[in-house]
Amino acid sequence: MKNSRQKKILELIELYDIDTQETLIERLSEVGISVTQTTISRDIRELKLVKGMTGKGTYKYIVPGVKKENNTPVLNSALTDAVIKIEAAKNIVVIKTFPGMANALCVCVDTLEHPHIVGSVAGDDTVLLVIKDDETAQMVEEKLKGVFGVK
């Protein structure tokens, strides 16, 4: 029951701009799944959903990132479009995003589980990644530019 409900939640957030738990409960009800707010809250936490900005300037639930079997990240297009600039400075990689997108992007980068990323911090429009050393930071910068399609 739980797995099928969570699978349906993922389908619904891909199909619709769902911005509140209430809206998600309504959409689930429309497909015959009755849930409480507590259950939805738990599902959102377990699925690691975050709110990301849409092209219209509003927010909606998104899946920040998942992995395929070969560990290649599959990213929501809202996240890849949110990245403005990626730049290494010593052992830190700075990712500039559109306002409101840094947190979702940071969660996505965390799901990559990159062995050289020691930690990450997100603000409103900036993600700071702490890398093991300066040389590796350059490599991580290039890898992330490829992942997010940034030049």
Image: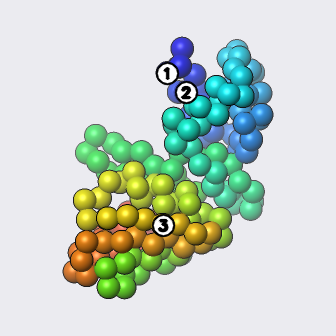
Q: How packed is label 1: few (under 14 Cα within 10 Å), some, or many (20 or more)? A: few
x then y, percent, for residue 24:
71, 33
x then y, percent, for residue 21:
72, 36
x then y, percent, for residue 51:
64, 51
Callout 2, which amino acid?
A: Gln
Callout 3, which amino acid?
A: Val
Q: Which residue is mark 3?
A: 121
The first of marks 3 and 2 along the sequence is 2
Between marks 1 and 2, how big is the CA–CA gap? 5 Å
Residue pictured at 53% horizontal, 66% vertical: 122
Q: Is residue 116 above or below residue 60?
A: below
Between marks 3 and 1, how big is the CA–CA gap? 31 Å
Q: Which residue is mark 1?
A: 3
Seen from the viewer's position, the closer of residues 4 and 135 is 135
Report the disc number at residue 6. 2
Circle 1 sits in a helix, a strand or a loop, which is it?
helix
Which residue extends farthest bottom? 89
* CB within 8 Å, label 1 to label 2: yes
Residue pictured at 63% horizontal, 39% vertical: 13
Query: In the picture, which quadrant includes the N terminus?
Result: top right
Callout 1, which amino acid?
A: Asn
Residue pictured at 75% horizontal, 21% vertical: 30
Q: Is residue 97 above or below residue 87?
A: above
Say if residue 12 shows up in the picture: no
Query: In the picture, which quadrant includes the C terminus?
Result: bottom left
Position of 112 with respect to 48 (left or right) is: left
Residue pictured at 39% horizontal, 51% vertical: 111
The first of marks 3 and 1 along the sequence is 1
Circle 3 sits in a helix, a strand or a loop, which is it?
strand
Say if residue 30 shows up in the picture: yes
Between marks 3 and 2, how big is the CA–CA gap? 28 Å
